Image (spheres, rainbow, N blue to C red):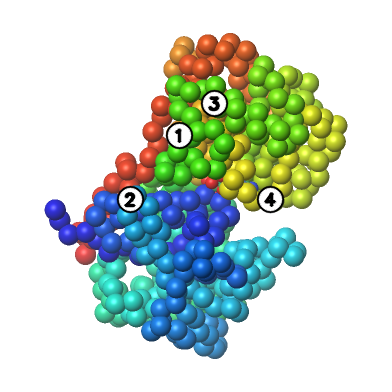
Amino acid sequence: MSKGLNILFCTSEVTPYSKTGGLADVSNSLPQELAAAGHAVRIITPKYGPMDERRLRVYEIKRLVNIEVPVADRITTCNIKSSFIVSPKGKVQVFLIENNEYFRENSPYVDEKTGKDYENNDERFIFFNRAIVQVLGLLGWKPDIIHCNDWQTGLIPAYIKTIYAKDPLLQNVKSVFTIHNIAFQGLFPYESFLKSGLPHNIWNEEGVEYYNQFSFLKTAIVYSDAITTVSENYAREIATTHEYGMGFEGLLKTRKKDLFGILNGVDYSVWNPEKDNLIPFRYNAMELPLKRENKKVLCKKFGIEYNSETPLIGIISRLTDQKGFDLIKKIMPDLMKENVNFILLGTGDKNYQKFFEGIKKKFPKKVGLHFGFSEELAHLIEAGSDIFLMPSKYEPCGLNQMYSLKYGTIPVVRKTGGLADTITEYKNGKGNGFTFDKYDASELMKAVKKALKLYKNREEWIKLIRNAMSYDYSWQVSARKYIDLYKTLLKKS
Ligand code: ADP
């Protein structure tokens, strides 16, 4: 067997230490799969807030304290703590960067008191990026690949190629940057660029300047050796249209030969109804009455009247326009006329919260709401719902529709990004869900109605459930693609 690679995986969130969305799941499961394939992977991430270090088994590393990191015109310090993600696949070491000035709060990006981004997000993530390149030499380990994710790690590829270019540890290292969502561009004023310590000669259009602003995302796209995104379809979309590229389509076109779409996978040791410890009744495709038992528990929890003839629609999502909530809002009055119940778990836009609270008031027995983040409820909703709604405006990959398949909860999705790559219309006994094309409320309603209609035909519905449950989106295939990409890059040096 050939020698494994050393891979440093840099991420601003990773379960079980932090999570706001899919990135945290991917940052946990992809490194494990890479490790299982024989590579040495280490994750590096911020240590947010007062973390339960005992429960999460986070330990001090005595020699890695008070490490100096320049930010703006001063020197700040950090400690590096260590933990391990342990699973049947193996063990992956996680380095957590501790700094009580920048990462004092639990919430990674948004100030929970105001609901807005932290005012010093520029400094927080300049610090994080710079700390990573700064501590590398102290880890006693030379990476072959530095894999960065989203704008919060976007400066690392530029540091490697500029002010740290002569660092012996970084000779021949290759950087990969994964775009999990191009809407988040890390845009800050010129003053933030000055705080980064990056050299002045890259403040221009070919470098890091984006319409007079400093963009962490642009920095990453310009300086990384390869760029990936989380589905093939999204890779195509962001490099061709302004609607999806959101201003970066031109730049991405210039890097087209270095841009790859690699679909995210699912960690089936976490998202599998047969082994799920967070649901009351575990089941497989041959034990569907047990899925109904979960539905009963779920309905009870949300004060909804259970009826086997009434399909239950579930949503687990950030409450943002991206996820298609304006369409859901529009169809809600019509939807409530149907024989259907509805459960929503989400956090985000307060206006949407208010809207759904209004609907719940009108239909208390048909609608269940939980505004907050709950891993436990997320699993129960996947297990207990009949239909999963995901009418996204755009969707880089989407994980929930893949989780839903495994739980036999039929996705109704808009055909965009990763949703188009993973969900195919159910027809003549084939396919795994219901789809619609145009971003339009009546199109969404038509798709939902197709699902409601088929639900009445129990035999067909069970066939569809079994189809859905048979899909396998495990990480193995995608991890292989990342490994092939890493190897191709390393051959180039
Ligand atoms: P995104 O990363 O755009 O938010 P994904 O579908 O890729 O969307 O991933 C979302 C992840 O976050 C899933 O694991 C989903 O279960 C989880 N999630 C989203 N909102 C909540 C919530 N309120 N409570 C628990 N889990 C949530």
Circle 1 is placed at which residue position? 274
Q: Residues within 10 Å of mark 2 (few under 14, many from 20)?
A: some
The dot on residue 372 is 4
Q: Which one is closest to the eye, mark 4 or mark 2?
A: 2
Give the amino acid type for the residue marked by disc 1 in the picture. Glu
Q: Nearer the viewer, residue 487 or 246?
A: 487
Indicate whether 85 appears above or below 134: above
Q: Which circle's residue, 3 or 2, is located before the other in the chain?
A: 2
Mark 4, ligand 1, within 8 Å: the answer is yes
Residue at 36 percent of width and 60 percent of height: 92
Q: CA distance from mark 3 to mark 4?
A: 27 Å
Circle 3 is placed at which residue position? 290
Q: Residues within 10 Å of mark 4 (few under 14, many from 20)?
A: few
Label 1 SS: loop
Residue at 41 percent of width and 27 percent of height: 470
Circle 2 is placed at which residue position? 89
Q: CA distance from mark 1 to mark 3?
A: 11 Å
Residue at 54 percent of width and 60 percent of height: 18
Q: Nearer the viewer, residue 323 or 284?
A: 284
- In which image quadrant can residue 61 be found? bottom left
Give the amino acid type for the residue marked by disc 2 in the picture. Lys
Q: Please, which residue is most extreme toward the front here?
A: 280
